[in-house]
């Protein structure tokens, strides 16, 4: 249960990477830091302003979505067409700036976000199930269902898919590619905020929770970088592996197990579980 | 404007382009050699140590420049190689191996580590490679903290001052010259490779793997070589780093350091040896500059421990947005401005509007 | 002696037979052209010969040696060079560096020699440079020597592709649509060069081309393909008037 829930968080962050990668071919190393910002905004709304948890969640998601769209419109749009590596470095730089911003605004203390699920348990047939973990799993499932419906059943979702397949062609077909990209960033940042809020009850909020993004990379690669179901599956696999390696292997292996799996995967099957390997045409 | 007349093929493979260039580089060399003496005379000895950092970072910069700037392979885990070099060197010194033996062993060990990482890396491109090296670096960092019999874990590992052939480099000025020597050596070796078939093969791989292959370049071999050479240089830098920092701990060689090293080559300017040095000056001298600036900032901001990382991030973002060729690119533009004066056209370096080019296929 | 032969060559891409049982022989010293509508599998044949693709069936023979399983980077060393239809130059390097890279197959220096730039390496470098300069003179591109490829116009890049292939000192030169994107004048230049390559340099040419005037002007023999299968083989005249070929181009 525990591993599954943590895996869901990895999966959600990985989902954020994959959405942006599929659409714009940028790899957003600041995804983890967006998660951190989302969690902090929810904390502000719930604890400092005394709002309801659900209102706080909506506010955090909306704020982060707008932030994501602005990020794309102001900064990332300018680097489209530049080498991928430059863009990766750009997002790393942005991530560092977000962390510094958070540490200036909220300090380096550790916060707890009170939620309706905190510290509640249900005993079911002798097994104790903590509500926090259930909330993560259910939340992930709902979010995935919503995203899936959006991408396959709405005009906008299909237009997004088109824009990610061929930018120029989509442009000529009258799809406002720039706007679409901003929207994708908004969705991705919103997903990050949800992940941050779901994570908050299990792991406390501090400026470094964004480093969970590194493990989410392992999840994204495991699933094949361009695959949305792959990202979730990869996340859950990583979560479970971490749990079991923590239980069975010597101390120290828990923290690196995700990366060992990642390296093995890349060495054996670089395209990931669900990915396909392409080749340049000459 | 200066014209270069070419009368001999040798001109294109010389270290320096012509007598004028040779003169300027000689002058620069003399200035760098004389600098500590001037600083001592001015009683600003503190800066000798800071400039030594420039030399060490310069070697790191060359290492990454070969890999990222010339071969087009991105590593987000080079701090691991630096760490391997540093720990290996410190370990051998502690076990009575003299300096020259220890540094050679450290270079060999990091080179082997580079080959080890390079081999699986051959099958990956772009972002996958970056993530794989990142994973490698995180695992190595864990090894540093757990392998206590060698690294002493979080207790840390003191490193004594360097002694080469009985001569002690305890003094900052002496160590300055030692690092300068290794930087010049690294520059010379790298420049040699770049003007030979190996360097050209690297550049070819960077620009088009398929064409390089069709022209007879063994991709696997040359990518591994780039990794191995880059790691070897990192090992050299690591040995000097160990002496300079005097106390090794696992939390020095973090992902943040790896990113800082990448920042170095980007800010300096990808694809040029000058860039590695410019970047090293920048990365080595920025923290002391920030330290000085802290006194002038409002207290709420200046007390933040994460301030440095944020400023690095901000500069990275600005450089990528406005000067993708880094300091070296700016330097070339300024040079051109003066050599063309007053005919310089702003549009000379204007970038074309570009659409997304897929890098999924390479 | 067999100079170059493809025997029953075939490759599948996910069930589609891009090349299906193609057999042809190129004789030493001739210009052999493959024509066919788009998607006929012409470039795929080139990619099979330069070993970028793995043949599913068939055999490739070059100078009596089976090269069906030779690693791709060994092909240049054997004496087969190629150009690319969509130009695959090393963009952020000068023209000179591009051509010098083509000497890679003739590299004799080892890593440590290069690290120290020994007199031996220096001598080799100068020899490479001389070989490259001959090609530069041959194709008349002296003025672009130190220009970065990104700054060159399309026509010159196309010539540079040719120059780079020639710098490998090939016995067999594969030209993938040498005239695509060139204007009439540049195409005429290209035709002269291809003939000179055969007559003056003695290099055998295997070419894929769409421009029938160029094909007729230079080709000794022509092979027509459609949907990966061979339609006709013979002189340019014979193939152009072959009923199957006419049908492939005009439909019906």
Image (spheres, coloured by chain):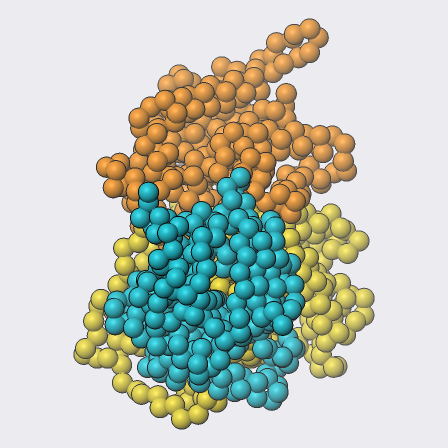
Chain colours: A orange, B yellow, C cyan
Residue A11 x %, y %:
53, 31
Q: Quadrant of the N terminus of chain B?
A: bottom left
Rendered view: C177 above or below B186: above
- Residue under the point 39% across and 76% down: C195
Q: Is residue B302 visible?
A: no
Q: Would residue B214 be visible to someone looking at this image?
A: yes
Tell me which residue sits at (55%, 57%) in the image: C23
Is A264 situated left or right of C225 in this image? right
The residue that appears at 69% across and 73% down in the rendered structure is B162
Horizontal placement of A278 versus C147: left or right?
Answer: right
Locate residue A184: give its quadrant.
top left
Image-quadrant location for residue B83: bottom right
Percent position of residue A18, x then y: 46, 37
Q: Relative to the observer, which residue lies in front, C158 or B72?
A: C158
Which residue is found at the position 47% from the left and 73% from the top? C30
The residue furthest top is: A125
Indicate the quadrant where residue C119 lies.
bottom right
Q: Nearer the viewer, residue B360 or C234?
A: C234
Does residue C134 appear left or right of residue C106 in this picture?
left
Note whether A206 is above or below B167 in the view shown: above
Q: Position of residue C62 (x, y in %)?
A: 60, 67
Horizontal and vertical percent position of residue A269: 62, 43
In the image: residue B121, left or right of residue B298: right
Observer-nearest residue: B187 or B173? B187
């Amino acid at each position: 249960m525990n591993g599954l829930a943590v895996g869901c968080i990895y999966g959600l962050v990985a989902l954020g990477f994959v959405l942006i990668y599929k659409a714009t071919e940028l790899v957003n190393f600041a995804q983890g830091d967006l998660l951190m910002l989302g969690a902090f905004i929810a904390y502000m709304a719930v604890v400092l302003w005394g709002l309801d948890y659900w209102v706080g969640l909506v506010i955090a998601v909306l704020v982060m979505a707008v932030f994501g769209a602005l990020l794309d419109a102001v900064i990332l749009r300018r680097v489209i067409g530049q080498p991928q590596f430059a863009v990766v470095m750009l997002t790393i730089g942005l991530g560092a700036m977000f962390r510094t911003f958070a540490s200036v605004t909220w300090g380096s203390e550790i916060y707890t976000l009170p939620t309706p699920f905190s510290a509640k348990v249900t005993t079911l047939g002798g097994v104790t199930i903590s509500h926090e973990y259930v909330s993560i799993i259910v939340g992930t499932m709902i979010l995935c269902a919503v995203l899936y419906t959006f991408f396959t059943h709405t005009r906008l979702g299909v237009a997004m898919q088109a824009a990610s397949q061929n930018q120029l062609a989509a442009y000529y077909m009258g799809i406002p590619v720039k706007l679409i990209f901003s929207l994708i960033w908004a969705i991705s940042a919103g997903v990050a905020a949800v992940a941050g809020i779901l994570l908050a009850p299990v792991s406390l909020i501090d400026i470094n929770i964004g480093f969970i993004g590194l493990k989410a990379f392992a999840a994204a690669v495991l699933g094949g970088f361009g695959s949305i179901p792959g990202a979730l599956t990869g996340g859950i696999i990583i979560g479970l592996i971490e749990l079991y390696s923590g239980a069975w292997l010597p101390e120290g292996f828990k923290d690196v197990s995700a990366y060992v799996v990642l390296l093995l995967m890349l060495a054996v099957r670089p395209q990931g579980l669900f990915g396909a390997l392409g080749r340049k045409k000459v | 404007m200066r014209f270069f007349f070419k009368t001999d093929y040798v001109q294109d493979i010389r270290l320096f382009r012509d007598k004028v260039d040779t003169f300027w580089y000689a002058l620069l060399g003399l200035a760098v050699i004389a600098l500590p003496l001037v600083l001592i005379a001015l009683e600003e000895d503190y800066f000798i140590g800071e400039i030594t950092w420039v030399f060490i970072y310069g070697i790191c910069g060359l290492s990454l420049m070969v890999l990222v700037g010339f071969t087009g392979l991105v590593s987000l885990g080079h701090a691991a190689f630096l760490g391997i070099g540093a720990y290996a060197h410190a370990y051998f010194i502690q076990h009575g191996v003299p300096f020259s033996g220890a540094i050679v062993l450290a270079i060999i060990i990091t080179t082997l580590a580079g080959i080890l990482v390079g081999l699986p890396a051959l099958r990956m491109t772009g972002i996958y490679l970056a993530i794989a090296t990142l994973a490698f670096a995180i695992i190595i960092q864990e090894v540093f903290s757990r392998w206590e019999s060698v690294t002493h874990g979080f207790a840390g590992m003191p490193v004594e001052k360097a002694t080469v052939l009985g001569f002690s480099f305890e003094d900052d000025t002496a160590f300055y010259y030692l690092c300068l020597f290794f930087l010049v050596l690294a520059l010379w070796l790298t420049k040699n490779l770049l003007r030979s078939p190996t360097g050209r093969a690297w550049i070819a791989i960077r620009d088009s793997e398929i064409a390089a292959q069709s022209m007879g370049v063994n991709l696997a071999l040359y990518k591994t070589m780039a990794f191995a050479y880059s790691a070897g240089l990192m090992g050299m830098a690591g040995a000097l780093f160990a002496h300079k920092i005097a106390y090794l701990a696992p939390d020095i060689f973090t992902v943040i350091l790896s990113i800082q090293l990448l920042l170095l080559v980007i800010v300096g300017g990808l694809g040029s040896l000058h860039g590695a040095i410019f970047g090293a000056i920048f990365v080595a001298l920025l923290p002391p500059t920030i330290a000085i600036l802290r006194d002038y900032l409002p207290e709420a901001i200046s007390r933040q421990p994460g301030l440095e990382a944020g400023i690095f991030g901000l500069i990275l973002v600005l450089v990528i947005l406005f000067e993708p060729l880094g300091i070296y690119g700016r330097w070339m533009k300024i040079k051109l401005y003066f050599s063309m004066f007053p005919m310089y056209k702003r549009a000379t370096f204007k970038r074309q509007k570009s659409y997304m080019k897929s890098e999924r296929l390479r | 002696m067999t100079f170059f032969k493809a025997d029953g060559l075939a490759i599948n891409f996910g069930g589609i037979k891009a090349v299906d049982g193609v057999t042809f022989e190129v004789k030493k010293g001739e210009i052999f052209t493959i024509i066919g509508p788009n998607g006929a599998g012409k470039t795929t044949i080139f990619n099979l010969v330069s070993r970028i693709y793995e043949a599913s069936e068939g055999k490739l023979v070059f100078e009596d040696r089976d090269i069906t399983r030779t690693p791709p980077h060994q092909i240049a060393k054997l004496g087969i060079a190629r150009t690319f239809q969509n130009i695959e130059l090393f963009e952020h390097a000068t023209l000179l560096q591009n051509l010098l890279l083509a000497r890679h197959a003739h590299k004799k220096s080892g890593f440590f020699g290069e690290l120290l730039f020994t007199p031996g390496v220096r001598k080799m470098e100068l020899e490479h440079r001389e070989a490259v300069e001959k090609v530069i003179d041959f194709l008349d591109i002296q003025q672009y020597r130190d220009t970065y490829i990104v700054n060159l116009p399309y026509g010159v890049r196309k010539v540079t592709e040719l120059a780079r292939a020639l710098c490998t000192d090939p016995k067999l030169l594969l030209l993938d649509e040498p005239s695509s994107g060139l204007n009439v004048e540049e195409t005429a230049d290209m035709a002269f060069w291809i003939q000179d390559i055969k007559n003056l340099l003695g290099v055998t040419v295997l070419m894929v081309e769409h421009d029938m005037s160029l094909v007729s002007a230079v080709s000794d023999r022509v092979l027509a393909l459609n949907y990966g299968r061979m339609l006709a083989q013979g002189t340019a005249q014979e193939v152009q008037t072959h009923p199957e070929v006419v049908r492939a181009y005009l439909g019906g």
